[in-house]
Image: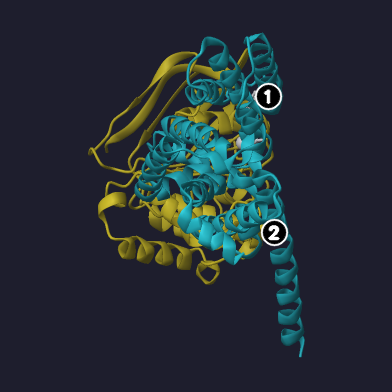
Amino acid sequence: MIELFKDLFEYQFLQNAVAAALLVSVVAGIIGTYITSRRLVFLSGGITHASFGGIGIAYYVGINPVIGAIIFSILSAFGIEALSHRKNIREDSAIGILWAFGMAVGIIFIFLTPGYAPNLLSFLFGSILTVTNSDLLYLLILNIVVILFFIIFYRPILYIAFDQEFARTQKIPVTLMNYILIMFIAIAIVLSIRVVGIILLISLFTIPPATANIFSHHFGKIIFWSILLSFLGSFIGLILSYSINIPSGASIVVVLVLMFGVVKLLFSLYNRIQRKLIMF
Amino acid sequence: MNKILDVVKVTAGYSSDIVLKDINFEVVDNDFIGVIGPNGGGKTTLLKLLLGQIKPFQGQINFYPSSKDETLFGYLSQVSDIDREFPIKVIDIALSGLMSNRGFWGESRKENRKKAFEILTITGVDHLYNRSVKELSGGQLQRVFLSRALISQPRLLILDEPNTFVDNKFEKELYELLKELNKRMAIIMVSHDVGTITSYVKTIACVNRNLHYHRSNKITTEQLAAYDCPIQVITHGKIPHTVLLDHCKEGSV
Ligand SMILES: Nc1ncnc2c1ncn2[C@@H]1O[C@H](COP(=O)(O)OP(=O)(O)OP(=O)(O)O)[C@@H](O)[C@H]1O
Ligand SMILES: [Mg+2]
């Protein structure tokens, strides 16, 4: 453990990993609170896996896979948003179709790409220890944009998320707002892939808000606590992964789930004590 | 009297289903219109049409704004598909009614919160201001939604069966409150409680695929039949009412 902190000062890649964990925690805390409050977890899972199609095509064509993933995930997110407003296609079916289709396209194109795709495993399971400076720069820009957007539009975002039908009667550009937010979801997902990978990514967006929601029902406070819990979990997970040499993405997720369990337990204990006090 | 909106020869409905056929209607400042009609007659559809949530197949709806930054609509829907688990507090739901106010961005948060507390006090749920949605009873939630509709002092208040879920005592208070508010705003209210509302509203719109606008709050069973509005007028003992049953001689139509 102490050794890790010594290494932390010495090695650039460890500093990058901690910085990435922090940046991803902030954006995942904000976007994740929105996702879980609006019950868009399944949709986000769809976007995540659809983005794999973009990665596959990007490999095949020979462009930056992150760009491929962003294009693919934004398109699929917009597609889902547009489809779900037509009553003849159920939203969850649309998501399921996209989910499978994206994965299939990705696998086919990677298979067709001549030679070995070296980073494929890191896209599936994440590789926070190989985060580059440009990864960090993208994440930083995304963080600034998302933070500003949520500070300026906090109330409209909250009100639209709670009751779209009413918001539409109040001269608010609900549709535009929904598209902007779903675009943020898509970009945040793709840029976070490096940290935990496609397969485990959704956990980062859902477990911390779900944990905070156990003891808070205030949108803004859930965001705050999610960021905190997310960073704590990522940091502990990172230490574990480094010291006992297990995959970082998986160890972060396990820590986050354990934290969820502990909070749940503590909260029900707290409630029980409160009840006892009231009854006496 | 300034016109707020008019509906001209509008036909509307959902996908292939025509619900309202060739209707004409208008709302003027300080109107108090009771909308009655059988289940599925198209009352909610009419309101959605006015609110712009659905577009007419034919015909048009014109608005006559009095000033650029008025809040046109306050709206209480019949059923809302909100998520009861959503993390939002009562006070914030009330505040969300101020969304379209120009002052929403400029006015201080303190000012808005004060307004929210005032309105929650009127609807009798101020003590619940810090509760989240899932901790409310059906009637309490209805009162919160009513507060949200009222807080902006809209030019036109649209209420779709506001008396659902709430107890008798509050229902009575609500109608008195609306009477008071009507001095400042026009109100359209859907209700099945015809006997009661006719003593509060000024005019009646009977909606059953067609719309018959009855420019009086007195209506007879015969007139209802003539309007093809098959509803029963139940008279309530204690509440003073002006519904005339079987009084053909007084009926003018
Ligand atoms: N979203 C929808 N899609 C398709 N048809 C609809 C939709 N909403 C309502 N309808 C149909 O339109 C007709 C009118 O419905 P509306 O909700 O306007 O009735 P209402 O007069 O408000 O009835 P109630 O007294 O039950 O509230 C009904 O036949 C209903 O089945
Ligand atoms: Mg209705």
Nearer the observer, A248 or A55: A248
* Image location of residue B198, percent across then percent down: 54, 47
Q: Specify the colour of chain B.
A: yellow
Residue extending furthest toward the bottom: A280
Closer-to-camera residue (B193/B158): B158
For marks 1 and 2, give the CA distance. Answer: 27 Å
Is residue A158 or residue B13 the one in the foreground?
A: A158
- The reply to whether dot 1 and dot 2 touch (C-beta < 8 Å) is no
Q: Which residue is mark 2?
A: A260
| Residue behind label 1 places its C-beta within 8 angstroms of ligand 1 | no
Quadrant containing the N terminus of chain A in the rendered view: bottom right
Picture residue at 59% right of the left edge, 45% below the top: A205
Q: Is residue B215 visible?
A: no
Kind of element beneath mark 2: helix
Q: Quadrant of residue B187?
A: top left
Viewed as shown, does residue B169 lie left or right of A183? right
Which chain is disc 1 placed on? A
Q: In the rendered image, is residue A101 in sight?
A: yes
Q: Quadrant of the C terminus of chain A?
A: bottom right
Q: The disc labelled 1 sits on which kind of residue?
A: Trp
- The tag on residue A69 is none
Which numbered marker is on residue A99? 1
- Measured as percent of width and height from the top left, residue B18 is found at 60, 16
